[in-house]
Image (cartoon, grey):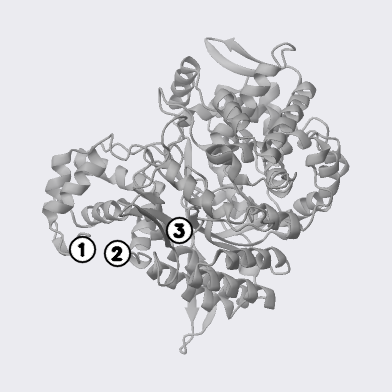
């Protein structure tokens, strides 16, 4: 599970906690250029990799090849997001690199922006709203540009002509109603037929659910259920439903072979034997597509806690599937931030206390919390569904039975959060949206600290807390499962961040610091995250629905006691919290309900909760927020460029050192990735 925290909250903190940095590191951080590019609603940032130089040569070699594996699966995600994405990207890149007309024209500038958006979204849809991008260049300009390029530079396959290519792309790019949403979550719609994602082909929602229900019903009492459908595309051909598995020899084979090649290289430099076992299991899964092997890999991965270096690589999260079954490809490579990890180690060491005191029905608490491993990490490479947009926290594996029996790993990506914070300094956000100097001051002093702590609690304990009743699985909540799960983890973190235990454990300095997180969370859930929604649209992304659900529910329940209210000043609307203690109690009450829904698999209760509190938008407030945010000239979304890692070799080809460069810009990086890591063709 990913924790996709809103950059607005990072902007709100306006305060940076530098961890384990000496004066020299702080000075270099101050001089570092975090912001790289800005276009449409996106700002592209850089992140630093502090302390990489202090790693051993073996650790650097290990990271280098894991980084290469992280980049090798790039094309997989493009194709998963929509079957036309690779063709669109390659055509746009061919125009960008070879266009001989007026490169200063409005049309070419608009095409460049559109291409940057496609890179950001890993396809033709927005990475967060899932809406299809609207081109600002003319169809005539596009057609003329394509026709004037050497056809050998275009993605023509199997004898396709340029005219046939344009026939397809004109509809894909310029028809606003065709493939309108990548992931549609509208209640009452057929979520598969109305979504552009490429996990299903010619398959209705009912057909997909029946297909996987029949498989599950063959083993109704499974205590260790595999994640059916996780690594396949479900297609209907000649009225027969068939899974196309993603593995070597199957779908996406060429890209997976490159991933495995680099994993084999990385294994030579593993820090310990358990890391080698993990890589062997992952390669076995990539080779066989056996989901039992995938579970074995997850178990071995959870067990590996001794190494400094770690990674995620594979078909992992299911947010891109409207039914929450099939996983997108992603990768993150990292090493432990030893000093900052003391915070998460303290939290995980007290996991049983948090579980025993959780404000949920006691029958839904775990009697014994096992194997929670939490750390703060320094990211070295983002790939797949974690690039260019990335979470700031991850908790895996997702299988509940593995989490219950073997535990889980949680990470907080502190060099990513630092990049958000640094880029947001002096943004004007706090002056525009905070009610008074009290809120501004408390967020300035404690905002970054409480934001990171909230992420720690969310990932380390929130997702790992509670238990399901016998016979219940995460699939019971269907399309609402991701929203409910994120709400459950958020509520756990919100409830406990205000507990005096935080002071006892030296995680917060006093009993008031938590208010920074409460204020930014409520303001965001009620107001400022609306900057990410187009006018007249509902909320559809799972994390945004979660935050809206929580904020709207406690706002409504607290009206009698005036716990939280909207106030107007100078014609502008502000969120004001009048009773922080009562607000904490409301978070606890909602956690009780959300955990009950999760533990019992109550689909109807989940549906009612999400649809009532997490979907609808106040249009008047929305219009006001959009106007105020636009006047600040801020981009509501952030993406990243990766550092460039270069292997220094001797005359025999042995790596003698690995260096980092931060000079590559967004366009050059994307074009290089398309040149060096584009492995999939039409027949995948």
Which residue, given by chain and number where applicable, does mark 1 sit on? 157
Mark-to-mark CA distance, 3 and 1: 24 Å
Which disc, if any, is residue 355?
Answer: none
- The residue positioned 46% from the left and 27% from the top of the image is 538
Q: Is residue 73 left or right of residue 269?
A: left
Q: Earlier in the sequence, mark 3 or mark 1?
A: 1
Q: Mark 3 against mark 1, which lies toward the viewer? A: 3
> How would you rate the neighbour count of disc 2 (Cα within 10 Å): few for under 14, some for 14-19, many for 20 or more?
few
Label tally: 3
Disc 1 to disc 2: CB gap under 8 Å? yes
Secondary structure beneath dot 1 equals loop
Disc 3 to disc 2: CB gap under 8 Å? no
Q: Position of residue 447 (x, y in %)?
A: 68, 36
Which disc, if any, is residue 232?
Answer: 3
> How would you rate the neighbour count of disc 1 (Cα within 10 Å): few for under 14, some for 14-19, many for 20 or more?
few
Q: Quadrant of the C terminus?
A: bottom left
- The residue positioned 56% from the left and 15% from the top of the image is 573
Please tell me which residue lies in front, 458 or 397.
397
Q: Is residue 657 left or right of residue 83?
A: right
Q: Earlier in the sequence, mark 3 or mark 2?
A: 3
Q: Is residue 404 above or below residue 598?
A: below
Secondary structure beneath dot 2 equals loop
Q: Is residue 288 left or right of residue 90?
A: right
Q: Position of residue 395 (x, y in %)?
A: 65, 52
Secondary structure beneath dot 3 equals strand
- The residue positioned 76% from the left and 30% from the top of the image is 588
Quadrant of res 154: bottom left
Which residue, given by chain and number where applicable, does mark 2 sit on? 683
């Amino acid at each position: 599970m990913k924790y996709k925290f809103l950059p607005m909250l990072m902007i709100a903190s306006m305060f940076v906690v530098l961890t384990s940095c000496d004066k020299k590191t702080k000075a270099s951080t101050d001089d570092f250029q975090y912001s790289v590019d800005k276009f449409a609603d996106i700002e592209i940032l850089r992140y630093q990799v502090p302390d990489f130089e202090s790693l051993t040569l073996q650790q650097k070699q290990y990271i280098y090849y894991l980084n290469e594996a992280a980049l090798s699966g790039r094309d997989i995600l493009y194709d998963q997001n929509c079957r036309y994405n690779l063709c669109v990207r390659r055509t746009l890149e061919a125009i960008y690199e070879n266009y001989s007309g007026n490169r200063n024209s409005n049309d070419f500038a608009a095409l460049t922006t559109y291409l940057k958006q496609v890179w950001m979204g890993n396809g033709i849809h927005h990475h967060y709203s899932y809406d299809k991008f609207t081109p600002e260049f003319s169809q005539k300009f596009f057609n003329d540009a394509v026709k004037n390029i050497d056809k050998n530079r275009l993605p023509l396959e199997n004898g396709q002509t340029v005219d046939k290519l344009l026939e397809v792309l004109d509809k894909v790019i310029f028809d606003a109603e065709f493939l309108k949403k990548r992931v549609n979550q509208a209640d009452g719609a057929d979520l598969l037929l109305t979504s552009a994602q490429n996990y299903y082909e010619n398959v209705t929602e009912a057909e997909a659910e029946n297909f996987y229900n029949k498989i599950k019903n063959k083993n109704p009492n499974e205590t260790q259920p595999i994640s059916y459908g996780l690594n396949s595309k479900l297609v209907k051909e000649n009225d027969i439903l068939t899974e196309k598995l993603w593995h070597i020899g199957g779908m996406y084979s060429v890209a997976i072979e490159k991933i495995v090649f680099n994993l084999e290289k990385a294994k030579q430099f593993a820090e310990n034997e358990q890391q080698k076992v993990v890589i062997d299991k992952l390669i076995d899964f990539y080779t066989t597509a056996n989901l039992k092997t995938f579970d074995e890999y997850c178990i071995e991965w959870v067990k590996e806690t001794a190494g400094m270096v770690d990674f995620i690589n594979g078909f992992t999260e299911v947010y891109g599937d409207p039914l929450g079954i099939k996983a997108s490809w992603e990768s993150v490579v990292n090493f432990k931030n030893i000093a900052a990890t003391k915070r998460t180690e303290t939290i995980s060491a007290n996991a049983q206390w948090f579980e025993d005191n959780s404000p949920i029905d006691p029958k839904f608490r775990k009697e014994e919390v096992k194997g929670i491993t939490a750390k703060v990490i320094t990211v070295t490479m983002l790939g797949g569904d974690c690039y260019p947009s990335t979470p700031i926290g991850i908790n895996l594996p997702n299988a509940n039975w593995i989490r219950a029996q073997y535990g889980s790993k949680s990470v907080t990506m502190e060099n990513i959060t630092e990049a958000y914070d640094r880029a947001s300094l002096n943004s004007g956000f706090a002056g525009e949206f905070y009610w008074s100097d009290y809120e501004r001051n408390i967020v300035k002093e404690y905002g970054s600290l409480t934001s990171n702590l909230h992420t720690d609690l969310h990932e380390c304990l929130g997702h790992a807390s509670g238990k399901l009743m016998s016979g219940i699985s995460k699939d019971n909540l269907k399309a609402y499962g991701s929203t409910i799960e994120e709400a459950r983890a958020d509520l756990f973190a919100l409830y406990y961040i205000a507990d005096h235990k935080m002071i006892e454990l030296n995680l917060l300095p006093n009993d008031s610091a938590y208010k920074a997180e409460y204020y930014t969370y409520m303001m965001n859930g009620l107001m400022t995250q609306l900057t990410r929604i187009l006018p007249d649209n509902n909320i559809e992304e799972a994390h945004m629905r979660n935050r809206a659900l929580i904020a709207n529910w406690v706002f409504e329940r607290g009206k009698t006691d005036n716990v939280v209210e909207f106030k107007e000043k100078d014609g502008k609307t502000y969120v004001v919290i009048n009773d922080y203690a009562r607000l904490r109690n409301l978070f606890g009450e909602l956690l009780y309900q959300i955990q009950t829904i999760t533990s019992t698999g109550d689909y109807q209760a989940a549906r009612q909760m999400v649809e009532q509190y997490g979907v609808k938008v106040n249009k008047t407030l929305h219009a006001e927020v959009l106007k105020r945010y636009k006047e600040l000239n801020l981009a509501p979304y952030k993406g990243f460029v990766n550092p460039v890692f270069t292997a220094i070799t001797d005359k025999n080809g042995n790596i003698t050192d690995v260096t980092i460069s931060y000079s590559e810009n967004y366009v050059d990086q994307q074009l290089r990735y398309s040149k060096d890591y584009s492995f999939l063709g039409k027949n995948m």
